[in-house]
Image: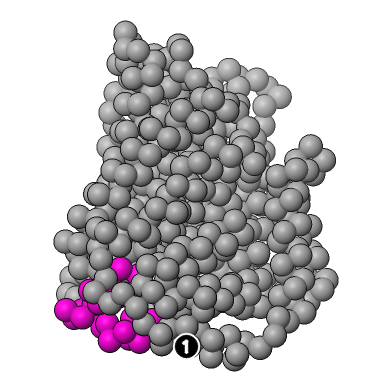
Amino acid sequence: MKPTSTMNDPVKAVPAPAGQKKRMIMLFLPVLVAVLLLLVPVPAGLEPYAWHFFAIFVGVIVGLIFEPLPGAVIGLTGVVVIALFSQWLLFSPAELADPKFKIPGAAFKWAVSGFGNSTVWLIFGAFMFAAGYDKTQFGRRLALILVKYLGRRSLTLGYAITFADLLLAPFTPSNTARSGGTIYPIIANLPPLYGSKPNDPSARKIGSYLMWVAITAACITSSMFLSALAPNLLALALVKSIIGYEISWGNWFLAFLPLGVILILLMPLLAYWFYPPEVKVNDEVPRWATSELEKLGRLSRNEILLLVFVCSALLMWIFATDWIEPAMAALLVVVLMLWTGVLNWNDITSNKPAWNTFAWFATLVALADGLARVGFIAWLGKEGSHLLQGYDPQISAVVLLVAFFLLHYLFASTTAHTTALLPATLTIAASIPGINMPVFCLMMVTSLGVMGIITPYGTGPSPIYYGSGYLPTKDYWRLGTIFGAIFLGGMMLIAYPWMVMMF
């Protein structure tokens, strides 16, 4: 996700003409990059139409990074351009030579192919679950209950925030929505109870600690559950398309489980050591949470129904994949929520983030699949394997994973990172004999959440907490480096041996 308006917006800080000029540059940049690549001679061994497709694809990625327009608009533009000029960008000479081949129809079917992808519908269904949490206030209730019982001490309050995110994560595919819609609005009320104010020396009393724990917890849970981060689901589709390996909800959870449990249990304590709060105990927080719970009243009918529905979906995702497609299970729950009144149809049609993500990911899936279709992925794997030829497969796998993790410094969107680098990395790994591809795929995709900790723009919630006024820039970069190293080390030393043993 792109950093939101919670960060200092440089466009707003300058006169309007300068801001407009910057926006025009960002609009022109993706087009310029694509045109320059189109003018570059076609690399040896690659068909011209495949290179041309790649040029447009890179232009889309540049657009997603700088986002002069919404991501869905950028993705849709790329798909439409390729479909309109499909004779030079999408179809091989052999296909075009076939008299039975109808270019307009084939181009349209490819352009909308992403909208029929089951992963895209799973993302949409999960967004509806999040809407249910928000409308019924069940997510807020869970967080307040934890704060009520764990909020007296600063350390246990850190655990309360972490457990609240953990409980919400399996059913909230946007960590931005999870943090911005539920977690942050609650914890933003806590520092003032301790006399801790933003953009003030008193921030270190407890506000800084709480905000850092919250962003770290969001990153960990985003890796722990397949359905906790939207790019996870995109990565799932890419792995299936490029490698042919299917990752179930249960396998994902099992693969990251040991590291996830360790990080969940240790992270608030590590933050307490590396970024200690000045205030250790306060009796006011539990009283405040108790009063807020009293305002909510008893558990409502819709909250109970929502709890039953989301637990049913979770059970189907884990145990019933042989009988029902996960996306269909999600849609079944959405229908049940509509019939029982937990949600109404207006909640569906007015959910702009859900529809925006639906269109965005559908176009990205089509574009990423197109790279494989035109032969670019196969060519890239062949060329990439030459660079790592002669190295031990395990060393090659480690180099690729570390590079994939650290290159996140260049991205303000996990989605753009996934779309740009995951297909290439998977293809290169698949071309190296001896690499355990199921394990490598799991390592790559489960790293997407935890890598978001390294920068103030690395994942959707980052700008929310960075912009809170409790996390100074130098502190964020320092802690991001420390915790990023801890997470990457945990992937190598804990997750990797566990995955090798299990898969």
Q: Which of the 4 image quadrants contains residue 383?
A: top left
Residue 318 forms part of the magenta stretch: no
The N terminus: image quadrant: bottom left
**Residue 207 shown in magenta:** yes
Task: Tell me what residue is drawn at x 57 percent, y 47 percent.
Answer: 226
Q: What segment is highlighted magenta in the picture? A: 190-210
Query: Neighbour class for label 1 at 10 Å: few (<14), some, many (≥20)?
Result: some
Judge from the rendering whether residue 294 lies leftward or rightward of residue 202; answer left or right: right
The quarter of the rendered structure image containing the C terminus is top right
- At x 75%, y 49%, the residue is 316
Which residue is labeled 1 in the image?
288
Whole-percent x, y for residue 190 in the image: 38, 81
Q: Is residue 363 above or below residue 242?
A: below
Local secondary structure at mark 1: helix
Q: Amino acid at mark 1?
A: Trp
Camera sees residue 383 = no
